[in-house]
Structure formats: structure tokens, C-alpha cells
Amino acid sequence: MACTDCMKASDFSIDKKGIKKRNWRTRIRYLLKTTSSSKSMARRRSYRPTVDEVNQWAQSLDKLLSHKYGKAAFRIFLMSEFCEENIEFWTACEEFRTISSLGKLSSRARSIYEEFIQCDAPKEINLDYQTKDAIVQSLCLPSLTCFLLAQKKVFSLMENNSYPRFIHSELYKELCAIARGEGQYLKS
């Protein structure tokens, strides 16, 4: 999402375990700048989410994820909580369901399984044994719905845990302020 070559040392913070993490404010600033490359402020403003759009994000996770910037902001929030694999898996499943070629379907199903489902996967998501086993069985002859149950479980997890924290987070409050034209990062 955000490129690290364009960030300064002050954009990183060290947590208690000594792990460097990027500041979410820097990521939001980067998102707003890279998606609005026009010269005039009025024109750049049109690329940012409106007050109504940002307010709709608080209505439901579906509304948040259906908006390009809402989904990006939620992903940034999840990265700050070290659980971005949930939105990445959900997005991969959404893209998977649009595949029309059987060969691509099989290849992408295997790829999603290896990245998110299998034991010790690089971005392993938290699923019960029965769900994982059903996915393994479906990999022999994958269909557009082979990840649907897992996707629903991950969505439910985000909806009940991460989403409420996002809506009450400083990041969301700052996005609301930016949409109203009051955010401190509009000037940067």
C-alpha cells in the first residue's frame, strides 16, 4: 500500500517489542496525496472521500468495504493492529469469485490456500479445522464458492472485532475531520 522509500525515519515508531511500524497518519497522508495528483486544492478535494461517504462507513462493514478509500483506510488500521491478513484474504476471495477460466480458478485457489489457509502459511488466517478441511477437499475441483464459508467467517470476525475498533479509532476520527476540511494533515 504505502511505499517505504518515501517515508522518513520519524514516520516509524518502535513498539515495546522493538518492532518498527509505520505511523497510520503517514499512511493516510500518503494515500490522500498519491490519489490526488492535481495541482489545485479544489480539484484534489474531489479525490478525497466526502463527509457523507466517511459517515456511511460507520453504518456497516459492507459500506466501508464497498468504498475504495474506506477499504484502504480499514486496511491501514488493520496493519496498525498486525492483522491485515484478514482484509487481504477477504479481498482475495472477492477477486477469486470473478475468475471465469477453470485453469486460472484452480491455480488461484491453490495460491489462496498456500498464502492464507495452510498450516504456517505466510498470512495464515484463524480458521477452525472443519473449515480448513472443507477447503482442502474442494481444491481437487475448485468452484467459485470454495472459499465462501471461510470468507464469511473472516468477515464476521472483522465485523465483530476490528470494525468497531476502527470506527472508534483516532484514524477514523481524523478521516472524518479531513472529510470536513479540518484535518491537520490537509496542509502537509
Image: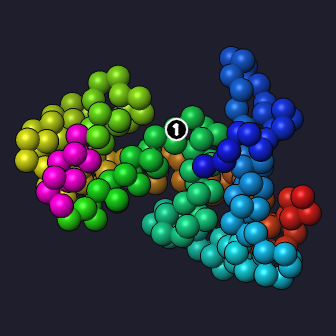
Does residue 16 appear in this view?
yes
Does residue 60 appear in this view?
no
Residue 90 lies, in percent from the top left, at 39, 52
Residue range in magenta is 101-110
Left or right of residue 99, residue 161 in this image: right
| Residue 107 lies in the magenta-colored region | yes
Q: Is residue 133 above or below residue 100?
A: above
State the SS at label 1: loop
Residue 133 lies, in percent from the top left, at 15, 34
Left or right of residue 146, residue 84 in this image: right
Q: Residue at x 13, y 49 (%)?
A: 142
Q: Residue at x 73, y 69 (%)?
A: 36
For disc 1, the marked residue is 83
| Residue 152 lies in the magenta-colored region | no
> What is the quadrant of residue 78 in the picture?
top right
Residue 143 lies, in percent from the top left, at 14, 55
Q: Residue at x 78, y 30 (%)?
A: 13
Residue 18 lies, in percent from the top left, at 72, 18
Crowdedness near tag 1: few (<14), some (14–19) or many (≥20) residues, C-alpha within 10 Å: some
Left or right of residue 29, residue 138 in this image: left
Q: Is residue 94 above or below residue 182?
A: above
